Image (tube, rainbow, N blue to C red):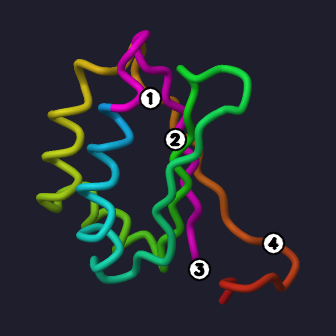
């Protein structure tokens, strides 16, 4: 069953462009990871310090492997100083016969 991750990110003032660049550098590598179907950064329209990362993974195993992959570990290390608070992570699964449900 697919898993969607929504990571809410609050960056320090003036750090948004750096975060966007880090995601751009990691995105190609993450999308090439087995099981990754989506890895998109979205910026809030009215608050430029607020972002969400929307990720979709084929299953728990691929998401777990992502957490140990170089693209993720490097991103996490480099982005830590850009964030005003730890990321808020929420995990979702499709219901009612939606696409991606086993």
Say which residue label 2 marks.
7
Q: Answer yes or no: do the residues labelled 2 and 3 have beta carbons within 8 Å?
A: no
Q: CA distance from mark 4 to mark 1?
A: 25 Å
- Residue 9 on the magenta segment: yes
**First reached walking from the N terminus: tag 2 or tag 1:** 2
- Residue 38 on the magenta segment: no
Residue depicted at x 23% and y 39%: 76
Indicate the position of residue 15 as horizontal and vertical percent values.
36, 20
Indicate the position of residue 56 as horizontal and vertical percent values.
53, 68
Residue depicted at x 53% and y 20%: 49
Q: CA distance from mark 1 to mark 3?
A: 24 Å
Q: CA distance from mark 2 to mark 4?
A: 20 Å
Q: Residues within 10 Å of mark 3 (few under 14, many from 20)?
A: some
Q: Which residues are magenta?
A: 1-17
- SS label for mark 2: strand
Say which residue label 3 marks.
1
Looking at the rendered structure, which numbered label has been put on residue 87?
A: 1
Q: Say which of marks 1 and 3 sits in front.
A: 1
The answer to whether residue 47 is left or right of residue 30 is: right
For the N terminus, give its image quadrant: bottom right
Q: Quadrant of residue 84?
A: top left
């Amino acid at each position: 069953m697919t898993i969607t991750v929504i990571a809410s990110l609050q960056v320090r003032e003036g750090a948004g462009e750096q975060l966007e660049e880090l995601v751009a550098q990691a995105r190609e590598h993450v999308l090439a990871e087995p099981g990754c179907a989506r890895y998109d950064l979205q910026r809030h329209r009215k608050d430029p310090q607020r972002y969400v990362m929307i990720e979709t993974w084929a299953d728990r195993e691929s998401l777990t492997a992502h957490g140990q992959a170089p693209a993720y570990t490097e991103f996490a290390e480099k982005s830590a100083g850009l964030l005003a608070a730890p990321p808020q992570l929420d995990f979702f699964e499709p219901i009612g016969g939606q696409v991606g449900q086993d």
